[in-house]
Image: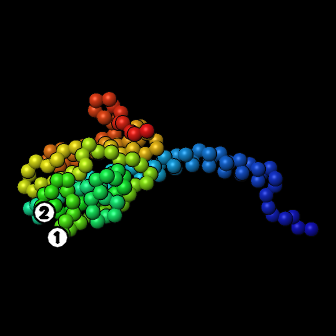
Amino acid sequence: MQKQAGFSLPELLLVMLLVAALTTIGVPAFRSLLLDARMVGQVNGFVHGIHLARQEAEKHGADVALCRSTDGLYCNHAQPWQAGFIIFVNRDRDDPPQVDAGESVLQATPAWPGGVITANRSAFVFRPYGKRSVNGTINLCDHRGPGAARMLIVSYTGRPRAIAADISSNQLRCPS
């Protein structure tokens, strides 16, 4: 009679125990990595948008606005920033900026359902030829709270920089 190949019950239980232990350790770390990647993606989306707006203001010789938008076509100043935003050439320089006939949308960024974005401006306007643009801050938070939050600081020249801690309190404020 031939001996059958396979695993014994103790060997199978040991393998299952190792898989359970590795899963218990690995899943939370992977989830944190995934949330960090999403946060970085949102920060980079804003930074890219700000650089695009600055560049297009110079290129077109006109104001370029970055404003909240839910449909990717028009500004919606009543919606939160996490609903999405658009960048467009604001030729008529209306305040608050609105997309009018003849003003093209340069970029539309979709909503971020996993987080909360707040800013101290209803829109950011970038002007050509080194003229003073609007400065401000943008806070990006997710359910992990202030420890994982990021802040974008936009200077008067329109240059963005990202930080992980508020300079005054070493902690960002996230809405509850």
Q: Callout 2 environment at 10 Å: few (<14), some (14 to 19), or many (20+)?
A: some
Q: Which mark is residue 91?
A: 2
Residue 73 screen position, x and y as percent: 28, 65
Residue 167's quadrant in the figure? top left
Q: Residue furthest top?
A: 169
Placement of 169 over or under 82, stated as above or below: above
118 w.r.t. 103: above or below: above
Give the residue at x 23% y 56%. 66
- Identify the residue shown where x is 31% and y is 52%: 78
Q: Residue at x 34, y 64 (%)?
A: 71
Assign the N terminus to one quadrant of the image. bottom right
Residue 17 in sight here: yes
Q: Locate residue 70, reporting x and y percent.
A: 34, 60
Q: Amino acid at mark 2?
A: Arg
Mark found first going from the N terminus, 2 or 1: 2
Q: Which residue is mark 1?
A: 102
